[in-house]
Amino acid sequence: MTCKTILAILQSEADTPRLLDFALPLTARHQGHLIGLHAEALPIAVATPLGGAMVDLTEEMRAEAEDRHARLRALFMERTQAEGIAAEWRGYDNVSGDSAISGIESARTADLVIAQQNDPDADARMTADVEALVFESGRPVLLVPYTFKGRSAPFKRVILAWNGSKEAARAAFDALPFMQEAGSVEVLMVDPQDFPHQDTGLAGSAIATALARHGIDVTTRTEISGDLSHGEVIINRLADTGADLLVMGAYGRSRVSEFIFGGTTRTLLQSMTAPTLMAR
């Protein structure tokens, strides 16, 4: 299995080189086609206290947006051509100026979406609604930590956060290309529960067996959270193992309740320590 159509969400000039350092080698490994996508906010005419529109300011904002489009497109095409990657550019102008939201439609016809985790210290204009991309696109989203440095390489050790949900199942099989190139995969369960057809002692064994049939070296591990959240347990396990990819379903009672009460998905989005593939 390979990822032939890959969509890269490029929200800002500052983050684009980092994201391309990750996306280009991955695309090359899969002999894929890379789509670069960026959106700019449409300038909105505002009125002066005297009631006249500030036309000069609006035109200045429009010119700046066009310049950013041009610079990002030039950088993207230069990098892809230099590395021999088949590529195309998609630029959008809309009210939000959010490249992640603008990329949802394009994401639905891609094998994989790559986006950057938002830097909590960045200006709001430099961030994208990656949660909407994960929850609404219907495609696997590979999130790159904003602290990522260097070029991506084949993953060596993968952790699959498994709870038996449909979201976790989708993430697991969407991540097969990366699990197959990895040296090992650990199926991690946190506080597994007994079910009529399976007790906690066998939790994760079925998905581990299914992955092993793809030639993957799989182990299982169970953790008890105690006073920690599930997200914190997963982050600790990533640190303990040195895993370079986390695979998990983006799940929760609802996006609204996760916003209010927190949740594993939100914890990982905010405290990402390794590239993370999420699927919904």
Image: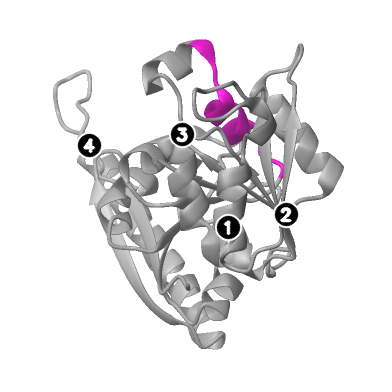
Q: How much space separates mark 4 and mark 2, taking CA atoms?
A: 43 Å
Question: Which is more N-terminal, label 4 or label 3?
Answer: 4
Between circles 3 and 2, the one closer to the viewer is: 3
| Label 3 neighbour load within 10 Å: few <14, some 14-19, many 20+ | few
Camera sees residue 209: yes
Between circles 3 and 4, the one closer to the viewer is: 3
Disc number for residue 244:
2
Question: Which is more N-terminal, label 2 or label 3?
Answer: 3
- Secondary structure mainly formed by the magenta segment: helix
Query: In screen coordinates, is 3 left or right of 107?
Result: right
Camera sees residue 22: no
Q: Give the residues in magenta.
A: 261-273
Q: How much space separates mark 3 and mark 1, taking CA atoms?
A: 16 Å
Per the image, is 37 magenta?
A: no
Residue 83: % across, % down: 56, 85
Residue at image position (79%, 33%) is 236
Question: Which is more N-terminal, label 1 or label 3?
Answer: 3
Question: Which is more N-terminal, label 1 or label 2?
Answer: 1
Which structural element holds mark 2? loop
**Which residue type does callout 3 highlight?**
Ser
Disc number for residue 66:
none
Residue labelled with disc 3: 165
Between circles 1 and 4, the one closer to the viewer is: 1
Question: Which is more N-terminal, label 4 or label 1?
Answer: 4
Determine whether label 1 and label 4 are within 8 Å by CB.
no
Query: In screen coordinates, is 6 left or right of 40?
Result: right
Residue at image position (56%, 45%) is 206
Determine whether label 3 and label 2 are within 8 Å by CB.
no
Residue labelled with disc 4: 44
Disc number for residue 211:
1
Residue 239: % across, % down: 82, 41
